[in-house]
Image (tube, rainbow, N blue to C red):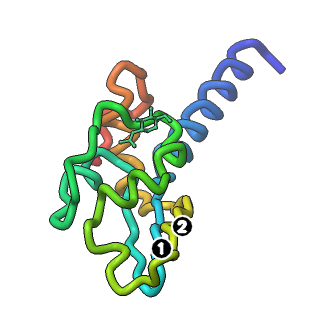
Amino acid sequence: MPAGLHAAAVLALLLVVAMVRAEITSFCKCTCGPNSIILELTREGLSNLPLAQEPIDLDSLSPIACMNCTRALCSKANRDLCNDAGANEEITPLCFRKLLALQHTMNAAMASRPCVALPGKDMPF
Ligand SMILES: *[C@@H]1O[C@H](CO)[C@@H](O)[C@H](O)[C@H]1NC(C)=O
């Protein structure tokens, strides 16, 4: 393969990888007895929790979002989580990931990587 073509192929691959990474959001499902809640493991998702027991320390969030899907996070996020649960019920955290819409992906990719010279930078999104 000619060198220029090879470089273009690598750049295209990196862009695809960046977008796929950006479109995956992690969530934490917290279950306690009959109750369950779903937390979006992002700064936005964790900063607006009306039933929080105490504010979540957003600066301590791990870059590997699922690392923060813990019993401690679940119990901070909702003070009523274990209401109606039996005395020996425990919180069970479950991390899962979800693909978000393409438009959102584009926005996230553009917003989080301002230093990457994207071809067609003035495309309307
Ligand atoms: C998130 O996880 C990291 C690494 O385990 C931990 O140090 C930090 O305290 C956690 N933050 C919250 C809000 O749970």
Dot 1 and dot 2 residues touching (CB under 8 Å): yes
Horizontal placement of 111 versus 1: left or right?
Answer: left
User: Helix, strand, or loop for circle 2?
Assistant: strand
Residue 80 x/y as whole percent? 27, 74
User: Helix, strand, or loop for circle 1?
Assistant: strand
Report the residue at 45% width, 78% height from top: 87
Which residue position holds label 1?
A: 31
Instruction: Give above or below for 41 relative to 85.
Output: above
Ligand 1 shows up in which quadrant of the image? top left
Residue 119 x/y as whole percent? 44, 29
Report the residue at 79% width, 16% height from top: 2
Residue 110 x/y as whole percent? 34, 36
Q: Which of the 4 image quarters holds residue 14?
A: top right
Residue 53 x/y as whole percent? 22, 58
Amino acid carrying label 1: it is Thr
Residue 92 tag number: 2
Report the residue at 35% width, 55% height from top: 104
- Residue at the farthest front position: 87
- Residue at the farthest top position: 3
50 or 124, which lies in front?
50
Report the residue at 22% width, 60% height from top: 52
Instruction: Give above or below for 39 relative to 81.
Output: above
Amino acid carrying label 2: it is Thr
Marks 1 and 2 sit apart, C-alpha to C-alpha, by 5 Å
Horizontal placement of 113 versus 47: left or right?
Answer: right
Q: Quadrant of the N terminus?
A: top right
17 or 6, which lies in front?
17
Ligand 1 is within 8 Å of the C-beta of the residue at disc 1: no
Residue 56 tag number: none
**What is the count of numbered marks?**
2
Assess disc 2: are there few (<14), some (14-19) or many (≥20) residues with their C-alpha within 10 Å of its C-alpha.
some
